[in-house]
Image (spheres, rainbow, N blue to C red):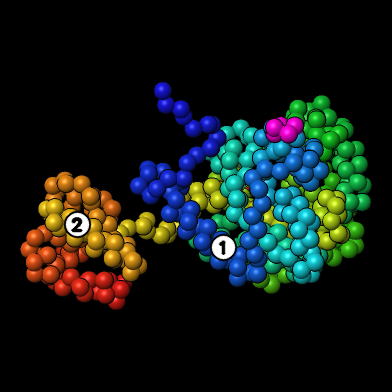
Amino acid sequence: MNIPIPPGVFDILPQNAKDTWCSSYLWNYVEAIMRETARQYGYQEIRTPMFERTELFQRGVGETSDIVSKEMYTFMDKGDRSMSLRPEGTAPVIRSFIENKLYNESSSNKLFYIAPMFRYERAQAGRYRQHHQFGAEAIGNGSPEQDVELIDLLYTLYQRLGLKNLKLHINSIGDTETRITFRKALQDYLKGYFEQLSSDSKVRFDTNPLRILDSKDPKDKEIVEHAPSILDFLSTEARDHFESVKRLLNSLKIPFSVNPKLVRGLDYYNRTVFEIVAGELGAQNSIGGGGRYDGLIKMLGGPELPSIGFGTGLERVIQTMIKQQVPLPKPYSPQLFIIALGEESKEAGFLLVHELRSQGICAEMDYSSRKLGKIMQIAHQMQSQYVLVLGENELHTQVVELKKMETGEKIQLSLPELAHWFITNK
Ligand code: HAM
């Protein structure tokens, strides 16, 4: 009996698999650009465990958020401690930042990660129970320049990956006092429509009314259309900060639209919040999002340090690249495929492959005793750039013929020259 993969998760497969977005070479390509872009913007990698104490997410992300209240993979370990698989990356990074006293090392810490996250969501296209995020957290700087540097990092990354038609939505959800006053005003407005709200929004009315603003339910959407705007409740300081963010985005020529209904689903945010959407993804159209979380470090027991970060899902990024038909790198293919005929040649070919690889050349060989035509077919399937047939004659004369698969062109070389030829003709 075969045991199938659990629902909502997927394998990342070798390149010859059918589903291109799940090909490891594509993931490697995207991850390499993410790492390189993060490096250029001064962000260093941090790796935290895949599970943490459940309390970290309850306190850090917030008990009223969907992620914590409905979607966590929580279990008791053998020491009777409640643990949860990481549903997001920010709370663990801040836990590590505080625990390792990274704040002693420099005044500003810029960290990034590429890691799997786990959320027990209703599995559908673009929404998985294990997804992967590239995330960045800039800790210790509260200036609008920092907000825009971080948004620019994400925007530049998408451009480098070839993504198009992206929309950046930004909003400011102000300081704690703003949200307390706004919450009251919003509840006063929604009271009159309470019975018409969706069942989720009825629950949120008391627990987290701001989330009703970005409900996907059509009736909720209609109701909040004329709701008060949080932007009218901002303190002078928060408003000035938001104005500077907009000005700096304009000066970097990053197009955006202000969406006063954007509140995001995690409780730690304040001031600037943002999301980047791609039309091609349908309902799950948010490919990346983030915001400021100036109170989180103190709340988790560290010093008072302002911070901002984002997370972008690799699945959604790669799926968008494919839907938008952006130019993708070619899958890996060997430079040379050696076909050895006869026992003696097989051993010589085996040694030759080893020798070529030790000089950095991607060489392949078929170890079976299949017929020449069949092996040639394998070399074709692997899209090898060159093939070389090694038989008794070639061993005797030490002269081989390289065949360029694409054009059929033939090149005669002496065996001892082979590695050098590949190194100089890359
Ligand atoms: P988030 O908006 O929950 O934010 O997730 C960030 C991104 O992860 C989303 O925009 C989406 O691309 C991807 N994503 C989320 N859930 C799924 C899923 N079930 N399946 C596929 N992709 C998904 C955060 O997690 C925050 N920690 C971001 C942040 C960092 N804010 C500040 N710093």
Q: Is residue 240 left or right of residue 102?
A: right
Residue 35 - label = 1
Q: Position of residue 22 (x, y in %)?
A: 45, 46
Q: Amino acid at mark 1?
A: Arg
Q: Secondary structure of the magenta portion, mostly?
A: loop
Q: Position of residue 136 (x, y in %)?
A: 67, 59
Residue 347 - label = 2
Residue 61 on the magenta segment? no
Query: Is any atom of residue 270 visible in this view?
Result: no
Question: Could you tell me how far apart the alpha carbons at marks 2 and 1 are, in whole angstroms?
Answer: 41 Å
Q: Amino acid at mark 2?
A: Glu
- How packed mark 1 is, by other alpha carbons closer than 10 Å (few <14, some 14-19, many 20 or more), is some
Q: Please name whichever residue, 203 or 409, is drawn nearer the observer in this view of the structure.
A: 409
Residue 122 in which image quadrant = top right
Considering the image in quadrants, where does the C terminus appear?
bottom left
Which residue: 32% across, 58% down? 333
Question: Tag 1, which secondary structure?
Answer: helix
Span of residues in magenta: 76-80
Residue 341 - label = none
Q: Nearer the viewer, mark 2 or mark 1?
A: 2
Which residue: 78% across, 30% down? 197
Q: Position of residue 346 (x, y in %)?
A: 17, 55
- Work out whether 186 lies above or below 167: above
- How packed mark 2 is, by other alpha carbons closer than 10 Å (few <14, some 14-19, many 20 or more), is few
Which residue: 68% across, 55% down? 310
Residue 17 in which image quadrant = top left
Which residue: 83% across, 29% down? 194
- Work out whether 20 lies above or below 336: above
- Work out whether 140 lies above or below 269: below
Which label's residue is closer to the chain start, 2 or 1? Answer: 1
Q: Please name whichever residue, 306 or 337, is drawn nearer the observer in this view of the structure.
A: 337
Residue 167 in which image quadrant = bottom right
